[in-house]
Image (tube, rainbow, N blue to C red):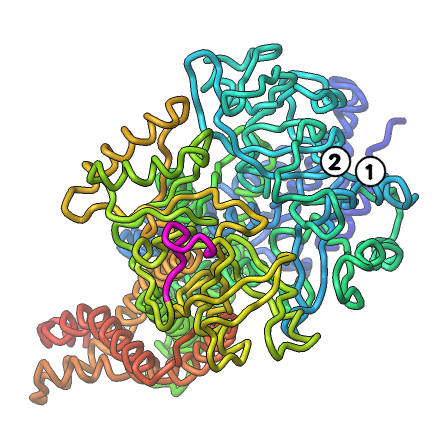
C-alpha cells in the first residue's frame, strides 16, 4: 500500500489540535489514495504535502478543548467530514482576511492614504540608500580573485609623521614576482593621457600603461581579443567600447590603427567593455603595453622614483601578514646609498576589499575612510524606514477606539487572539505592498537625479529573480515591522472593558506612542544639526582666503610642440589681447603637482631632511598671472635674470619651518642642486582648503620635472568667450594637430568641495524626508488626541473656553515631546558632528546658534503640523461633539 511522506504526517500531528488529528489524518489519507490512482504516487505525495501546509492556520495551530464549537470563529462541527471542506477552509479564511483588510482600508481612505504615502516615501528613500550602499560595498570587490588581490603601498616618516602613499618604483613588480614564491603574479599600472587620432577623429583620452598580466588580475569584460596576448606586444592598444565607437563608429575595431600624439601608431588588439563605475580604474579608456612605455626625462628606472602603481596576486591560502613581513624592507634594501635615511621605509600590501572604503591615512596606517559614510547612511536608511513604520503604528493605534469594539465583538463571538493578530498583520502587509508599488514608481522616477547627486550609475535589475525576491522580502519586512505592534496592541483588548468603554487615558504621563514620537523628533533633530554643521563647515572653507585670484585664471597642458614654441606662444597670447599675463608652470596652482623632501638649508639638521615640502615651478610672471601676493624680495623672472632658472620662492609656512630670519638670498639644496631664494610669497591654498597650508617651494625651470603647463590670466577687458576664441587661434597656430583644452581655476577650486557638498546635499535631502515622514506621524497623533478629547473640548467651550486656549491645550503636549526629544537629540548631534569635524584641520566650532536654530525650526514645524487638527477641533460646534451624550 502506498503511503504519504512520513515527515508531513509528523508535521500534521505537531501543529493540529489533538481532538482533530484523527479526523484530519483520515481525510488526508483517503484523498491521498484516490490521487495515487488518478495522478500517480509522486503527484499524490506533493498534493499531500500541500494539503498539510494549507492546514497550518491559527484556528488549527491553537490547541482547543474538544467541546469548543460555538461562535463565528469556532471550528465547524462538520470539519473533517469531507476532505474538500477541510482543505478549502484555509484558502477561504485567507480570502476573508484580504476582504476585511481591503474594506477597512476603503472605510478610512484618509488614514490609508497617509499611511501609504509615509511608507512609500520611507521605503523609496531607504531603498535608494541601500542601492548606494551596495554599490559602495561592491567597489573593486567584483573581481573573481578579489580575495587574493593587493596593492603595494609605501610607508615612511616625514616631518615626524608616519605617512603612506600608493605609488611605487618601476622595478618593484618584477622583483616581487621573481623572488617571492608566495606571490603568484604582479603587474604595474601607470596612468597617462594622449591625443588619439583615427582618420579624421581626434580625442584627448585618459588611459594607462600596464603589464600583460593586468587583465588576468583584473578580469574586466573583454569583448574582442585574446586576454593573454592583448598587452604582450610593443605596438598594441586595448580600447574601451565607448572609445571604439567614438574613433571608428563601431566596436569592430580589431586591427585598426590609432595614432598617439601624431607620432607613434598602435594597432587595436582588444576591445574592453566600458569599465564599471565602481572601480578605481573607471576613468581608463585605453591600455598600452608596458614595453611601449618610454621613460620621461624627469622619471627614473631606479628605486627612488615612485610614479607607478603595483598590484600583486597572492597564491591560494597564503597569509598576507606573512608576505608583508617578508617584503617590508625590500625597497629600503635597494635604497641604501640613494637616500639618507631608510630606517623607516617599508612596503606593505593593502587588500582590494579595502581599497575604496579603508583609504584614510592615520599615523602610517590605512584605516576607516568612506566606510564611515557608508555606515552613517546605513543608519539613516534604517531610521527613515523605522520612522515610516512608526507613523503607521501611531496612525493605527490612533484609530484603536474605532477598532476596539470590533475586536470586542469578534472575541465575544469566539475569535482567538492569534486569528486577530493574523488579521491585523495581513492589513499592514497589504498596505505595505500598496506602498511598495508606489515606492517602486518613486525610485524609477528619482534614480536618475539620485545618480547625479551621488555620481553613481545605480540601476534596478527588473529581469533578475534576486531583485524581485529582495523587493518582496523588503516589503514583507516593512509590513511586519509596521504592523506587529498595532496587531498585538489591538488583539490584546479585553472584551469586557471595551464594551464598558474603558480605555487608556489620553493624559497618561508616558505611553509607547509618545515614546515613538519622541524617537522620531530625536532623529530629525540630529539630522537638522548635522545639516547645519556641514553647511557651515563648507561655507567656512569656501570663504577662506585662497591666496591667489581665481577669476579669469586658466590652465592648459602644453601638448605636442607647445613647449618648444612656448616663448612665441606666450608673446602672441598677450599681443592678441587674449591674456594680460602668461606663466609656464609645473601644473595648476589649484592642485599639488609634486612633493619634495631631503631639503637642506643653513642651520638645518638631519631630521629636517624628513620635512616634506609641496613643490611648484614657474619661469616668470608667476605673481602677475596667479595674483599671489609678494611679501619680500622679488618674483622669479628668467627673462630679466637668467640665473633665476635656479631661483626659488618660499611661502610663509616654509620660512617658519626653516626658521629663516632673512630668507631672501639664502641658499638651499634639493633635487641634486643648489637654489637661491629670491622672494617670499603669502601662503596660498595648494591642497585641501580644509587642511593647514604646507611649506611650499616655487622653483625655476631647472628642476628635474619639466614645466609642462601654462597658466594664463585672461584679459578682463574682453568677455571670457572672446578671450578663449583668441587664445584658441594662437594655440592652433603652433599646435594645429591638437584641440585647445583648458580648465578654469575657479571651477577647479570649486571641485575641492564636491565630496562635502555631496554629503551635505544628501544629508539635507534625508533630513527633509525625515521631517516630512515625522510630520505625518505628528498629524496622526494630533488626530488621535483631538478625537479622544472631542467631548472634553465641547465641555470646555460650553463653559466659556476660547479658541486660542483650546489650541494651546492641544499643542502643549506636542511641544513637551519636542522638548524631551531636543534634550536627547542635541547632545547626540553635537557628539556626532564633533567626531566628523575632527577630520578637518581648518574647521568651525559648533556654537549655540546651531542648536537655537534647530530648536526654533523644529518648534515651527511642530506647531504648523499640529495647528490644523488643533484649529479644526477648537472650531467644532460643542453641540455636535456632545450630542452622543
Position above or below: 832 against 766: below
User: Between 368 and 204, which is closer to the camera in this rendering?
Assistant: 204
| Residue positioned 41% across, 68% down in the render | 679
What main secondary structure does the magenta stretch of the protein show? loop
Q: Please rate how many residues cluster around mark 2, counting C-alpha atoms within 10 Å: few if below 14, some from 14 to 19, many from 20.
A: many
Q: From the top left corner, tell me how far across and down residue 495 is, in percent.
A: 45, 71
Q: Which mark is residue 619?
A: none
Residue receiving disc 1:
185
Q: Residue at x 30, y 56 (%)?
A: 624
Q: Earlier in the sequence, mark 1 or mark 2?
A: 1
Circle on res. 217: 2
Residue 533 lies left or right of residue 477; in this view the side is left
Q: Circle 1 sits in a helix, a strand or a loop, which is it?
A: strand
Q: Nearer the viewer, residue 292 or 238?
A: 292
Query: What residue is rendered at 41% in x and 70% in y?
Result: 680
Give the residues drawn in magenta, as a range.
Answer: 634-644
Amino acid at each position: 500500500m502506498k503511503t504519504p511522506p512520513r515527515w508531513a504526517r509528523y508535521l500534521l500531528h505537531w501543529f493540529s489540535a489533538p481532538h482533530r488529528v484523527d479526523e484530519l489524518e483520515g481525510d488526508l489519507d483517503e484523498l491521498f489514495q484516490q490521487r495515487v490512482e488518478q495522478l500517480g504516487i509522486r503527484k499524490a505525495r506533493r498534493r499531500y504535502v500541500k494539503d498539510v501546509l494549507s492546514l497550518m492556520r491559527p484556528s488549527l495551530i491553537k490547541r482547543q478543548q474538544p467541546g469548543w464549537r460555538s461562535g463565528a470563529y469556532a471550528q465547524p462541527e462538520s470539519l473533517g467530514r469531507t476532505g474538500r471542506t477541510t482543505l478549502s477552509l484555509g484558502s477561504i479564511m485567507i480570502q476573508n482576511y484580504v476582504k476585511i483588510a481591503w474594506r477597512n482600508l476603503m472605510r478610512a481612505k484618509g488614514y490609508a492614504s497617509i499611511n501609504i504615502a509615509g511608507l512609500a516615501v520611507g521605503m523609496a528613500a531607504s531603498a535608494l540608500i541601500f542601492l548606494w550602499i551596495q554599490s559602495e560595498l561592491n567597489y573593486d570587490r567584483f573581481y573573481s580573485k578579489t580575495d587574493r588581490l593587493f596593492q603595494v603601498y609605501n610607508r615612511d616618516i616625514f616631518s615626524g609623521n608616519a605617512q603612506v602613499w600608493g605609488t611605487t618604483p618601476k622595478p618593484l613588480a618584477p622583483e616581487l614576482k621573481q623572488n617571492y614564491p608566495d606571490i603568484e603574479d604582479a603587474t604595474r599600472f601607470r596612468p597617462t593621457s594622449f591625443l588619439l587620432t583615427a582618420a579624421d577623429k581626434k580625442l584627448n583620452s585618459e588611459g594607462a600603461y600596464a603589464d600583460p598580466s593586468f587583465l588576468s588580475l583584473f578580469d574586466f569584460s573583454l569583448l574582442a581579443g585574446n586576454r593573454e596576448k592583448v598587452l604582450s606586444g610593443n605596438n598594441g592598444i586595448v580600447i574601451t567600447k565607448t572609445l571604439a565607437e567614438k574613433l571608428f563608429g563601431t566596436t569592430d575595431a580589431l586591427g585598426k590603427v590609432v595614432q598617439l600624439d601624431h607620432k607613434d601608431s598602435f594597432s587595436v588588439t582588444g576591445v574592453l567593455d566600458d569599465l564599471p563605475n565602481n572601480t578605481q580604474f573607471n576613468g581608463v579608456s585605453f591600455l598600452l603595453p608596458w614595453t611601449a612605455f618610454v621613460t620621461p626625462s624627469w622619471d627614473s628606472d631606479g628605486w627612488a622614483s615612485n610614479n607607478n602603481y603595483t598590484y600583486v596576486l597572492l597564491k591560494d591560502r597564503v597569509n598576507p601578514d606573512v608576505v608583508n613581513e617578508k617584503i617590508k624592507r625590500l625597497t629600503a634594501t635597494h635604497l641604501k646609498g640613494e637616500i639618507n635615511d631608510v630606517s623607516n621605509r617599508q612596503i606593505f600590501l593593502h587588500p582590494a576589499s579595502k581599497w575604496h572604503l579603508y583609504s584614510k591615512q592615520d599615523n602610517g596606517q590605512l584605516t576607516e575612510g568612506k566606510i564611515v559614510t557608508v555606515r552613517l547612511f546605513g543608519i539613516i536608511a534604517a531610521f527613515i524606514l523605522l520612522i515610516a513604520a512608526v507613523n503607521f503604528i501611531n496612525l493605527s493605534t490612533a484609530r484603536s477606539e474605532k477598532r476596539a469594539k470590533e475586536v470586542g465583538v469578534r472575541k465575544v463571538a469566539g475569535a482567538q487572539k492569534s486569528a486577530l493578530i493574523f488579521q491585523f498583520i495581513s492589513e499592514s502587509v497589504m498596505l505595505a505592498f500598496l506602498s511598495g508599488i508606489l515606492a517602486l514608481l518613486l525610485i524609477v522616477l528619482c534614480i536618475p537625479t539620485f545618480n547625479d547627486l551621488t555620481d553613481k550609475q545605480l540601476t534596478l535589475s527588473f529581469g533578475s529573480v534576486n531583485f524581485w525576491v529582495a523587493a518582496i522580502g523588503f516589503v514583507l519586512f516593512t509590513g511586519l515591522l509596521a504592523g506587529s505592534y498595532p496587531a498585538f496592541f489591538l488583539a490584546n483588548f479585553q472584551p469586557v472593558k471595551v464594551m464598558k468603554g474603558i480605555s487608556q487615558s489620553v493624559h497618561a504621563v508616558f505611553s509607547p506612542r509618545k515614546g515613538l514620537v519622541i524617537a522620531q523628533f530625536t532623529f530629525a533633530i540630529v539630522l537638522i544639526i548635522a545639516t547645519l554643521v556641514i553647511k557651515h563647515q563648507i561655507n567656512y572653507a569656501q570663504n577662506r582666503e585662497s591666496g591667489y585670484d581665481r577669476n579669469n585664471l586658466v590652465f592648459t597642458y602644453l601638448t605636442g610642440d607647445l613647449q618648444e614654441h612656448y616663448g612665441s606662444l606666450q608673446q602672441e597670447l598677450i599681443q592678441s589681447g587674449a591674456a594680460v599675463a602668461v606663466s609656464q608652470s609645473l601644473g595648476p596652482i589649484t592642485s599639488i603637482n609634486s612633493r619634495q623632501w631631503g631639503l637642506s638649508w643653513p642651520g638645518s639638521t638631519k631630521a629636517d631632511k624628513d620635512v616634506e615640502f609641496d613643490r611648484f615651478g614657474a619661469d616668470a610672471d608667476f605673481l602677475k598671472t596667479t595674483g599671489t601676493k609678494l611679501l619680500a624680495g622679488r618674483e622669479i623672472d628668467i627673462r630679466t635674470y637668467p640665473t633665476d632658472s635656479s631661483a626659488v620662492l618660499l611661502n610663509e609656512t616654509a620660512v617658519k619651518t626653516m626658521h629663516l630670519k632673512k630668507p631672501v638670498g639664502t641658499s638651499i639644496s634639493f633635487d641634486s642642486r643648489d637654489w637661491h631664494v629670491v622672494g617670499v610669497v603669502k601662503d596660498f591654498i595648494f591642497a585641501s582648503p580644509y587642511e593647514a597650508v604646507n611649506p611650499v617651494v616655487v622653483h625655476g625651470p631647472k628642476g628635474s620635472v619639466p614645466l609642462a603647463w601654462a597658466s594664463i590670466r585672461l584679459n578682463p577687458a574682453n568677455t571670457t568667450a572672446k578671450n578663449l576664441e583668441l587664445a584658441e587661434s594662437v594655440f592652433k597656430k603652433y599646435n594645429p594637430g591638437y584641440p585647445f583644452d583648458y580648465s578654469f581655476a575657479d571651477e577647479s577650486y570649486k571641485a575641492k568641495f564636491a565630496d562635502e557638498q555631496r554629503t551635505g546635499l544628501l544629508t539635507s535631502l534625508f533630513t527633509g524626508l525625515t521631517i516630512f515622514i515625522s510630520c505625518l506621524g505628528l498629524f496622526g497623533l494630533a488626530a488621535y488626541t483631538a478625537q479622544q478629547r472631542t467631548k472634553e473640548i465641547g465641555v470646555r467651550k460650553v463653559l466659556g473656553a476660547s479658541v486660542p486656549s483650546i489650541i494651546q491645550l492641544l499643542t502643549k503636549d506636542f511641544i513637551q515631546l519636542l522638548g524631551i526629544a531636543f534634550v536627547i537629540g542635541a547632545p547626540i548631534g553635537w557628539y556626532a558632528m564633533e567626531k566628523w569635524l575632527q577630520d578637518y584641520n581648518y574647521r568651525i566650532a559648533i556654537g549655540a546658534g546651531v542648536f537655537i536654530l534647530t530648536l526654533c525650526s523644529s518648534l515651527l514645524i511642530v506647531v504648523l503640523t499640529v495647528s490644523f487638527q488643533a484649529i479644526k477641533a477648537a472650531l467644532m460646534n460643542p453641540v455636535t461633539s456632545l450630542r452622543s451624550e
